[in-house]
Amino acid sequence: MMRWAMIPGCLAVGWVLAVWSEPAWGGTLLARDGKSYTGTVEFKAGNQVVVTPASGGAVTLPFQEVARLSRPDAVPMPVLPPVGDPHLPLPWRQADIGHVKEPGSGTEEKSVFTLRGAGWGLWGAADSFHFVYQTLTGDCDVIARVGDPPFEDNPFEAGLTIRESLETNSAQAAVMMFPEGKLRMSCRPVDGSAEAAPPAGTKPYQWVRLVRAGDLISGFCSPNGVAWVLVGTVRVKLSATAYVGLACAATLNQAAVGAILDQVKVTAQGMGPAEGLGLVDGSLVAGKPRSLDGQVLKYLDAAGNERSLPAEAVAYLFTRPLPPDLRKMLAERKEGASLVTGDEMEGAVQGLRDGRLTIASLILGQQTPELSKTVTAVLRPVKATGKCSVSTRDRSFYRCQTISVGDGVVLAEGGIAGTLTLKAADVVEVNCTGQ
């Protein structure tokens, strides 16, 4: 269990964050001399780190000799047999999901995937389609471009899906393109449940994207693979390891139809918090923004406690999981808000109250959009600073100037978020290569 406390008297910007839990955790230590140690990691008084491999023989190092510490995912990637599909490169595999009138197929040549699939598609209480997939553990980001459809008599859909299993009624989220250019995002929150779909899009986008951050799945579309528009965000109950890939269906379960998908990119990476604050030094703080005036931004942290930061420390607010490339683009954007409709509202963000932003729009005058209907709200530029960083279990990422360790704790100092005292078991990664 994680507990949070306010500790007065050691304030950089008004507060110190402390977390209590068990002191030891398994992970990998990379020393500055290039040596690597894997085992149980413990932090001891006197700025000492002790690593005990499973084979025994503890190694004690001064923390100054540590370059990086990282904790592996709690659920390891399953070991797949080395035998692959003769028509697909590893780690891709393929299968027909559900009842299909005729078998589907998938091939790859020069990074272009050609799928043929029958079935009814991904909707309702059960899916039926052809699936070219791989398994991924943890957060991930999947991108593909749906090519011009071949001439077919039957309507079809093609796109991306993330699923709990290969069963027809598996929990899943999908963003699918139809021949007329319409886009549809669907989801089945848990195995066997009825599908719940946000409203269908109508813009002729060819690029589709799915981003997983825990149980939150966000769908995006784009006309060019650079400027992305949020289609929707849904919550789907998934295990740590899920099935991710390309989907094609005839929609009427007639003869199998074809689809071409290229520019496919699958990335396994952390997405950061699902909702929170981006600070001017590049830190990410998990939380729910509550209010903002000219001096202070107040928010609820992951434990539900109210916190505050100086307004000038906050660069942007976000209400959806954002992959790193989209977060990086925020540093180049002007002040204003990006709405879930894909529209941009430029202007100074002057406040947040009762769930509504106040924006002095350059064109429309004062506007008060709902925060829940925005993707991001940019207040000021990001200028990443800090030689070190600490990542925590709630997906926060803190930049700082120095890191030290005590008896079962990690201390991060000199960051714009203040002095942080974190219990070791709640730290996912410590990076002090610049210290």
Image (cartoon, helix red, strand yellow):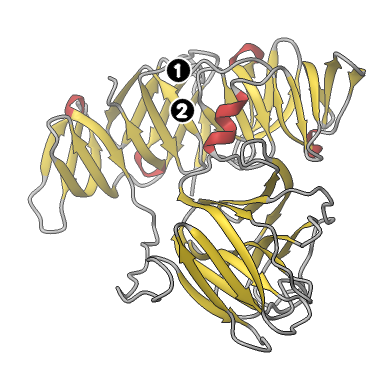
Kindly indicate the quadrant of the structure image that contains residue 228: top right
| Label 1 Cα neighbours within 10 Å, binned few <14 / some 14-19 / many ≥20 | many
Q: Label 1, on which residue?
A: 415
Q: Quadrant of residue 343?
A: top right
Q: Does residue 423 appear in the picture of this structure?
A: yes
Categorize mark 2 by other alpha carbons within 10 Å: few (<14), some (14-19), many (20+).
Answer: many
Residue at the outermost left position: 57
Would residue 93 appear left or right of 362 to someone viewing this image? left
Q: Amino acid at mark 1?
A: Gly
Q: Residue at x 85, y 17 (%)?
A: 361
**Quadrant of residue 259 within the rendered picture:** bottom right
Name the residue at 46% across, 27% down: 398
Q: SS class of the residue under badge 1?
A: loop
The residue carrying mark 2 is 398
Identified by mark 2, the residue type is Tyr
Q: Quadrant of the C terminus?
A: top left
Q: Nearer the viewer, residue 382 or 254?
A: 254
The dot on residue 156 is none
Q: Is the C-beta separation of discs 2 and 1 under 8 Å?
A: yes
Disc 2 on helix, strand or loop? strand
Cα–Cα span, label 2 and label 1: 7 Å
Vertical relation: 32 (above or below) 162: above
Residue 332 image point, x, y percent? 61, 20
